[in-house]
């Protein structure tokens, strides 16, 4: 998976959020992107987390908005009127994580107020919600939960593709060297499978032993795929973000620890059967 580096000459607007308040920009490829900085932090863990999530989701066959490394000139930030303090010019000494802008997305909660069966039938990839939940457990995502889905519904032919976004706060928002592969950290109330969307999909899915066995095979195959190209991908990341070899080794040990991954899958099965 190659990380493309593009630049922008046009900032369209700031997208005000409680988190990164990213910029909507026009890329040099003439596509619109949502660009995040990490406020000058080194290493920029939230940006590395975004790139790593995009890499892993691709290996898991879970669709996400296309990502790019985006360079925004300091002069462009200085000349742009009305930007908040989330966009100081020196923050852009470090390239941004950019995800392709999805036009006219539908809010998950707007879908859920419709008839439940009709809502389920509107989804092109409902099982991806299960797989996103499994992924979130694997990487200890602090920021996808019933009160903050961090999913968008992309309209496609009168139905919707479910896309995960905003993966900056994985690994419990910790330094990679502080990760402990002996533990699986899950919050019972903040789990996507106890959300209205999770219950909707569980209700309309036959979760039997065959389903569980297929999910087990899927999970371990995904882990294997991620590990195969992990070192090569992280070399790319280290070319543009400050991250040392010890941190990368700690991250690798955490993600591909067999005993921990067994616990991750057990937790997933427990949630599926609730």
Image: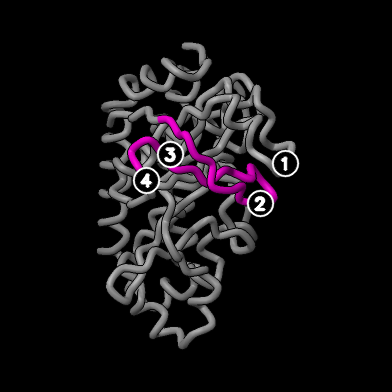
Identity of the residue drawn at 29% across and 63% down: 211
- What residue did someone put label 1 on? 84
Describe residue 200's horizontal placement relative to residue 88 as left or right. left
- The one of 164 and 154 positioned closer to us in this rendering: 154
Q: Where is residue 245 in the image (x, y as percent from the top left)?
A: 47, 11
Whether 257 is among the magenta residues is no
Element type where label 1 sits in the image: loop
The chosen color scheme is one colour
Whichever of callouts 3 and 4 sits on the residue coming sooner in the sequence is 4
Whichever of callouts 1 and 3 sits on the residue coming sooner in the sequence is 3
**Tag of residue 16:** 2
The CA distance from mark 2 to mark 1 is 9 Å
Q: Which numbered mark, 3 or 4, is in the foreground of this view?
A: 4
Q: Which numbered mark, 2 or 3, is in the foreground of this view?
A: 2
| Label 1 packing within 10 angstroms: few (<14), some (14-19), many (20+) | few
Q: Is residue 42 above or below residue 167?
A: above
- What residue did someone put label 3 on? 53
- What residue did someone put label 4 on? 31
The CA distance from mark 1 to mark 3 is 27 Å
Identity of the residue drawn at 49% across and 47% down: 136
Q: How many labels does the image show?
A: 4
Pointer 4 with pointer 1, Cβ within 8 A: no
Residue 183 appears in which quarter of the rendering?
Answer: top right
């Amino acid at each position: 998976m190659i990380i493309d580096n593009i630049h922008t000459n046009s900032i369209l607007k700031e997208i005000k959020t409680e988190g990164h308040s990213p910029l909507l920009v026009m890329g040099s490829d003439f596509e619109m992107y949502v660009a995040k900085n990490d406020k000058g932090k080194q290493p920029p863990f939230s940006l590395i987390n975004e790139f790593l999530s995009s890499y892993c989701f691709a290996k898991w066959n879970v669709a996400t908005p296309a990502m790019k490394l985006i360079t925004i000139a300091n002069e462009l930030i200085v000349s742009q009127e009305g930007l908040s303090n989330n966009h100081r010019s020196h923050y852009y000494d470090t390239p941004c994580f950019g995800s392709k802008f999805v036009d006219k997305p539908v809010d998950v909660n707007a879908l859920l107020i419709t008839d439940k069966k009709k809502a389920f039938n509107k989804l092109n990839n409902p099982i991806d919600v299960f797989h996103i939940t499994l992924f979130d457990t694997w990487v200890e995502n602090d920021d996808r939960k019933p009160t903050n889905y961090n999913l968008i519904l992309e309209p496609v032919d009168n139905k919707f593709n479910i896309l995960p976004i905003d993966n900056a706060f994985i690994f419990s928002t910790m330094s990679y060297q502080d990760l402990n592969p002996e533990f699986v950290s899950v919050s019972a109330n903040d789990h996507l499978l106890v959300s209205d969307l999770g219950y909707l999909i569980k209700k309309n899915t036959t979760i039997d032993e065959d389903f569980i066995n297929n999910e087990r095979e899927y999970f371990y195959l995904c882990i294997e795929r991620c590990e195969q190209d992990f070192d090569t991908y992280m070399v790319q990341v280290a070319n543009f973000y400050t991250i040392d070899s010890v941190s990368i080794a700690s991250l690798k040990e955490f993600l591909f620890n067999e005993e921990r991954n067994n616990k991750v899958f057990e937790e997933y099965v427990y949630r599926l059967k609730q």
